[in-house]
Image (spheres, rainbow, N blue to C red):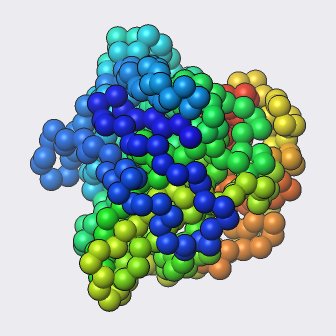
């Protein structure tokens, strides 16, 4: 097994091989003290501590990393990318209603941008290069926008996206709601994967369309750590914010007693207790952990791009080591809305059909970005979009500039309001969703498997005033 880490950190020791098909809540399978301790990503300093605003500075640059060659055991230096010298980049944290200002300086030798994934921002601040040029090497740009929805979001480049994200340019963006109940501990986990445990293709593994197709997800890291151990005390309330920053890897987390409180657009309408949590590339979710008297392993179940389970064994993603034991706390009083699903009314105004073959090209309505037909909808008015996946692969469909209120998947309405910016569509699935654009612009809509997106599975929705 390879291990990789930031050059400035001590190497986690080589650990035991993955367990074979462990039960989802099996006890920790190797001596926990041989595994790295979990740490949150660094937090960016708010340079404008006044109420109602937050200001951050980010520098996109290169980062030397050490990767251990699995054959020779030697450390190999590879060059990756990072924001402020760290991958994941620093967590940006604001409060609902804040005016956020982020100055980006590009010290890379290629053009870059930042896109605020999941946040609806004015078009000129969205970091896309459909109509804009992006930041040339050496350039600085100041993004500014108001955050209107609480939740767990993330930021990443939107130029040469597949390569730049794969090389390490990503970070979490948290919008807090002051009404949320306090918790004892908040964990931020940014997940990324390596193509395969025996590949040291620098820096984060190569890319391939078959990646994950047999359910073998390669080697996952949590904030750059392999199978870290989270320490928690019995009786604590822990809020866990998850970001899947992988280019193409699916995460299917499982452990006993999972409590999901939020999806990719903030709190769910009610607590959900799923058997597993599927996080496709680009997606986020929040869990509430209520540890009591036993340590447990959080497993990543095999998931195939071709629509479900795969051949591989479940692998540990991280462990929760509980000490000391104490009775579990009750769940916090999250301000769940209880909102119902919207009424599904009317024909779809915009239809996008996803097609392609393994190996590509990946198309939307038979077209390959940037040579796409651009439908138009009216600013401030609701419209119904429909996305049909006629290809043999899953695609996490992502909307810029507006969230999607799910009306139905395969004709079945959700049991409660379901609001998404990134939603996975398995082969043959059809999504109908309502969008109500708040900003004019030429909004990108695309698959968030980044080699699919860069390979052409992107399109544009024009939002204009009447
Ligand atoms: Cu994560 Cu078009 O973005
Ligand atoms: Cu996005
Ligand atoms: Cu795709």
Left or right: residue 358 versus residue 271 is right
Q: Position of residue 193 (x, y in %)?
A: 56, 42
Quadrant of image for the N terminus: top right
In the image, residue 226 sits, relative to residue 247, either above or below, namely below
User: Can see residue 143?
Assistant: no
Quadrant of image for the C terminus: top right
Q: Nearer the viewer, residue 159 or 234?
A: 234
Residue at the farthest front position: 72
Q: Position of residue 204 (x, y in %)?
A: 54, 31
Left or right: residue 194 versus residue 79 is right
User: Can see residue 325?
Assistant: yes
Q: Position of residue 269 (x, y in %)?
A: 50, 76
In the image, residue 23 sits, relative to residue 194, either above or below, namely below
Q: Position of residue 397 (x, y in %)?
A: 67, 48
Residue at the farthest left position: 50
The residue that appears at 35% across and 11% down in the rendered structure is 138
Q: Which quadrant of the view contains residue 254?
A: bottom right
In the image, residue 285 sits, relative to residue 454, either above or below, namely below
Q: Which quadrant of the view contains residue 23?
A: bottom right
């Amino acid at each position: 097994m390879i291990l990789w880490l930031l050059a400035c950190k001590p190497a986690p020791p080589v650990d035991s091989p993955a367990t074979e098909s462990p039960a989802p809540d099996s006890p920790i399978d190797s001596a926990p003290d041989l595994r790295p301790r979990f740490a949150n990503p660094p937090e960016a300093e708010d340079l404008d501590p006044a109420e109602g605003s937050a200001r951050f500075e980010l520098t996109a640059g290169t980062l030397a990393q050490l990767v251990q060659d699995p054959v020779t055991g030697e450390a190999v230096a590879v060059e990756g990318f990072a924001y402020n010298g760290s991958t994941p980049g620093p967590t940006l944290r604001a409060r609902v209603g804040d005016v956020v200002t982020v100055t980006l300086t590009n010290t890379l030798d290629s053009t870059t941008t930042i896109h605020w994934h999941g946040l609806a921002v004015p078009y000129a601040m969205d970091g896309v290069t459909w109509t804009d040029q992006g930041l040339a090497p050496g350039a600085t740009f100041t993004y500014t926008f108001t955050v209107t929805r609480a939740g767990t979001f993330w930021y990443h480049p939107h130029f040469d996206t597949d390569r730049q994200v794969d090389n390490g340019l990503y970070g979490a963006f948290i919008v807090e709601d002051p009404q949320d109940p306090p918790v004892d501990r908040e964990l931020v986990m940014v997940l990324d994967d390596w193509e395969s445990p025996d590949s040291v293709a620098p820096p984060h593994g190569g890319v391939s369309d078959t990646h994950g197709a047999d359910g073998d997800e390669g080697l996952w890291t949590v904030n750059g750590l392999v199978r870290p151990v989270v320490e928690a005390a019995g009786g604590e309330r822990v809020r866990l914010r998850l970001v899947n920053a992988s280019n193409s890897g699916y995460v299917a987390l499982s452990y006993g007693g999972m409590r999901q409180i939020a999806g990719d657009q903030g709190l769910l309408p009610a607590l959900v207790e799923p058997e597993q949590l599927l996080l496709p590339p680009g997606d986020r979710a929040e869990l509430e952990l209520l540890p009591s008297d036993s340590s447990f392993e959080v497993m990543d179940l095999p998931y195939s791009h071709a629509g479900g389970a795969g051949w591989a064994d479940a692998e540990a993603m991280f462990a929760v080591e509980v000490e000391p034991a104490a009775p579990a706390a009750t769940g916090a009083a999250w301000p769940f809305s209880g909102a119902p699903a919207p009424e599904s009314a009317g024909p779809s105004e915009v239809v996008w059909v996803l097609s392609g073959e393994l190996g590509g090209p990946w198309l939307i309505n038979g077209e390959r970005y940037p040579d796409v037909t651009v439908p138009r909808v009216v600013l401030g008015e609701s419209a119904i979009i429909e996305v049909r996946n006629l290809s043999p692969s899953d695609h996490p469909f992502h909307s810029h500039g507006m969230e999607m209120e799910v009306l139905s998947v395969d004709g079945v309405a959700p049991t409660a309001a379901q609001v998404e910016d990134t939603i996975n569509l398995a082969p043959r699935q059809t999504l109908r969703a309502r969008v109500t654009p708040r900003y004019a612009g030429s909004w990108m809509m695309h698959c968030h498997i980044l080699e699919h997106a860069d390979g052409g599975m992107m399109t544009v929705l024009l939002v204009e005033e009447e």
